[in-house]
Image (cartoon, rainbow, N blue to C red):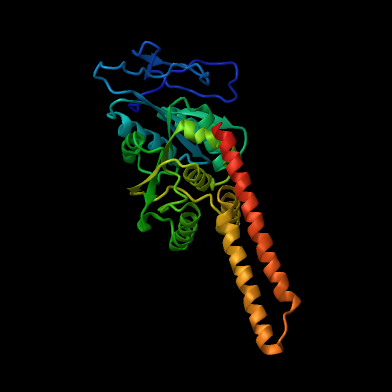
Amino acid sequence: MNTGMKGIDSQPTDTDRAEMSTPAGMAVLDPSGEERASGARGRPGKGDPGCATASPGDGRAKIRRVSIVIPVYNEVNAIADMVERIGVAISNHKNARYEIIVVNDGSTDGTADAARKAGARVVDHPYNIGNGGAVKTGIRYARGDLVVLMDGDGQHQPEFIPELVDSLEMYHMVVGARTLAGQASLPRAFANWIYNRFATYITGFPIRDLTSGFRAIRVDVLRRFLYLLPNTFSYPTTITLATLRAGYSVRYLGIRTRQRLGRSKLKPFEDGARFLMILMKIATLFAPLRIFLPLAVIIFSTGIGYYLYTFLSDHRFTNMGLLLIVLSFLMFSLGLISEQIAQLRYDRSEG
């Protein structure tokens, strides 16, 4: 089925670890910059010439290479329509060449076949690894300079892809921010509100939608933090905090969403508790003093308050008051050391 997609050329290598298919008739660019039909299969090498870039002064804009990565698990009812809608949305986007990569995360319902028939390249996992694990696989196989991440359950509207991509001319990452009406339920909306407020405090940047899986990001920025991404649903949190902490620019673009097809794979209590732990871990990884300093202040204030209470009631200074005050200084010192370690890690990664 012809989806109107504009593809990216590649050269197959011997390091292929998963099967990928490119439907015949898809337009791709060869090294000379001319479009040709492609039936190529395989993962691109590092020397892939990709899309042609206009020479200075010829009046043509730079052609952007865009990889759309969609992780799926048992989404046979949604994925074909999703791929076709993406093809329509990107068909008239000027100065961009697209590829659609569907990462089949061990589906058992024919999702992979439906995606292939719709015109996507498919990477198969032998078993279910996790939503974040599927995203990481798609990023490793992406041949574009820009990456668009989106869910395969039909919620995200492909019509916003061109605007996300165009915004990357100025920003390093652009996130599709859902409205209250776009949330799956009121309890989840409330939980996301708490997560957004906490992330805003950690980063010092107004976070509108911390958990949105619909975003576009420059691939060189994304691959810097690939090793940090978890295999679970909380990969958007890690990307957001890592990008902001590293000093990259982020834009939030308001989007509309549709009702998802099928049932959600999230487990409210199990995944909620895991997400909270990951959020705390990422917070202490990127901005530890933002966590340890308030704790130190709270413990110190408690120690002073307890000292005043015992002094006024018993006219003495107890060991518990002293313990709390000493513990507050230890907490502050631990945060200061953690902050220095985090900074050293960034210095090395930039070097």
Q: Nearer the viewer, residue 281 or 29?
A: 281
Instruction: Say above or below: 46 vs 235.
Output: above
Residue 307 horizontal side relative to residue 153, left or right? right
Q: In this view, which residue lies farthest toward the top?
A: 32
Residue 166 horizontal side relative to residue 20, left or right? left
Residue 283 horizontal side relative to residue 56, left or right? right
Q: Nearer the viewer, residue 218 or 317?
A: 317
Would residue 105 be visible to someone looking at this image?
no
| The N terminus lies in quadrant | top left
Q: Residue at x 48, y 23 (%)?
A: 21
| The C terminus lies in quadrant | top right
Residue 124 horizontal side relative to residue 317, left or right? left
Q: Position of residue 149 (x, y in %)?
A: 44, 38
Q: In this view, which residue lies farthest toward the right?
A: 319
Q: Position of residue 345 (x, y in %)?
A: 60, 40
Q: Residue at x 58, y 43 (%)?
A: 343
Instruction: Say above or below: 282 vs 68.
Output: below
**How many labels, in total?**
0
Q: Position of residue 93 (x, y in %)?
A: 29, 30
Q: Position of residue 43 (x, y in %)?
A: 53, 21
Would residue 210 be visible to someone looking at this image?
yes
Q: In this view, which residue lies farthest toward the bottom?
A: 313
Q: Residue at x 49, y 54 (%)?
A: 199
Instruction: Say above or below: 239 vs 271.
Output: above
